[in-house]
Every structure is written in C-alpha cells, then in structure tokens.
Amino acid sequence: MPGTDVEELLSLAVRLAESAGALLLEALGSAHAGLGTKTSGTDMVSDVDRASERLIVEALGSARPHDGILGEEGGVHHGTSGVRWVIDPLDGTTNYLYGQPAFTVSIAAEVEGRSEVGVVAAPVLGELFAAVRGRGATRNGSPISCSAKDDLDTALVGTGFSYEAERRRHQAAALSVVLPRVRDIRRAGAASLDLCWAADGRLDGFYEHGLQPWDFAAGALIASEAGAFVGDLDGGPPSGAFALATTPALFEPLRQLLVEARAGAG
C-alpha cells in the first residue's frame, strides 16, 4: 500500500492539476453546458467538468488505488490508506463557459482528515499555486506571502455568491453592510482562486458562505501557508458554513464586521 510521503503527494497533485488544466485549455470555447446543473438551475455543469474529473480520478486510481477520493462531479471512493483527495476539476465553470480566465483545477490531499498538500492551477493565467503544510506556499515555484494590510477601511476583499436564490439574498444583504467599510469588493467567481489571491497579496481578504469542501480544501491551505489567518466566524476551521481568509491583522476586524452583517445567515 502506498505511504503518505508528502513530496510524492505534491508531485502527483501538480502533475494532475497541470494535465487537467491542459485539457481545459484545449476544450476552451467548445465545451457544452446544459448537461445538468449543480446546486440550482443556474449553476451549470459542462462536459469538460466531467472529463477533467475523470482524468484526475483515473490517474489517482492507477497511482494510488488505496486512497479515498471526493470529487465535485461525483468521483467518490472510500479508501483505506488514510489519504483522501479532494478535487474540483473545474472551479469557475460559468467563467469557463463564458470564456473568462478566472477558472482553476483544485486538488488537495488530506491525511487523516486534514489537508497536507494543496495545488491550484489557473491554466489561462499560467499560474500554479502549491503548498505543503508547514513548508510555506508558492506560485510557479516562488515563495508567496499574504499582504501586510492592517487597515480594514483600505482593504480589498474578495467574496462569492451562491447560485441558490434565497442564499444570494442573504449574501447581498450582508454585502451592503461590508462594502461601505472596506476599500472595495472583488468577485472572481472561483473560490479556490480567491483564496490563492489572498495568499499572494492580490486580495487582503476573502470570505464566502456556503462553500463545498472541494472549493476550499486546497486554497485554504495555500492561504494559511502564505501567512494568512484562515477560519470561520466562530473560531473554527473553514467549512461549508463559512470560510474566511485574511491578513493576520484584519482577521478579527473583518470577522466582527461579518458577524454584524449576519454574513453566515441563510
């Protein structure tokens, strides 16, 4: 049975993220939507989502057949090795189908339930973010770190919105409280990329309510290893209930503002 050497896991994650990214680039402009939806009628899934996940899952099954797998498009395998791969084969499907560049392949390797390796590839941007727990984070092999911003009023903050109408209403109401208190808001449409941008100082913070494990498993580790504070609104780790990543100085002020705005409601 394969071991859990993190260098092996990292090398495999990078190779598969790059291969899936190449597949996405090759199909860009010709992928078809309408084969199904995810959380709502407006949350699209495409043929290339499934093709990307199939590529990753089949390669993992060959290289590490005893590992578990959790994939967004249904690739689930309960392994016995203590390692589980958490995969978003195309984060930002709507961007992809509209020809916008903010989409990624996100792959995390969990060991005994905790992300130890995270890789996020943004193929159009030519960037690959990676992290191993305790060893820092990189972009295209060079070390990265979060910004040093300590003033919420001048912070650039990323967020995202659900495709479920009722949750969107709650998120819009919370945003109306947050927006006047920060420099500005950005919405890229791919949480994994937002988290990497928080890691790389392109955002001073990011928050979102209602993510799935594959949305943040890799990106949250990358942000944390780049020096960002990562968690939820209640002092726990990021979760489907809430994910927040900011510079160390901004975490508590932004958390308090989000609590005030009831950003975790709905």
Image (spheres, rainbow, N blue to C red):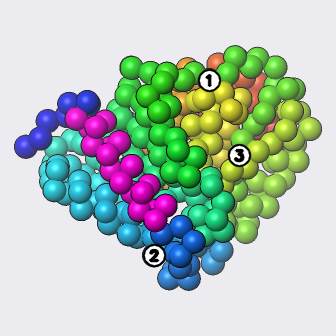
The image position of residue 220, as x and y in percent, is 51, 36
Q: Quadrant of residue 77?
A: bottom left
User: What residue is disc 1 on?
Assistant: 146
Q: For the residue carrying disc 3, how many other residues have a C-alpha within 10 Å: few (<14), some (14-19), or many (20+)?
A: many
Above or below residue 4? Residue 68 is below
Q: Quadrant of residue 184?
A: top right
- Label 1: state its secondary structure: loop
Report, in whole angstroms, how far the alpha carbon at label 2 lies from the one at label 1.
35 Å
- Relative side of 206 to 92, left or right: right
- Residue 128 can be seen in this image: yes
Q: Quadrant of residue 119?
A: top left
The image position of residue 151, as x and y in percent, is 81, 20
Foreground tag (3 vs 2): 2
- The amino acid beneath tag 3 is Thr
- The amino acid beneath tag 1 is Cys
Residue 19 lies in the magenta-colored region: yes
Residue 57 lies in the magenta-colored region: no
- Relative side of 94 to 46, left or right: right
Label 1 near label 2: C-beta < 8 Å? no
Q: Residue at x 23, y 54 (%)?
A: 60
Q: Residue at x 75, y 37 (%)?
A: 157
Closer to the N terminus: mark 3 or mark 2?
Answer: 2
Q: In the drawing, what numbered circle is on residue 47?
A: 2
- Label 3: state its secondary structure: strand
User: What residue is disc 3 on?
Assistant: 159
Q: Main secondary structure of the magenta part?
A: helix
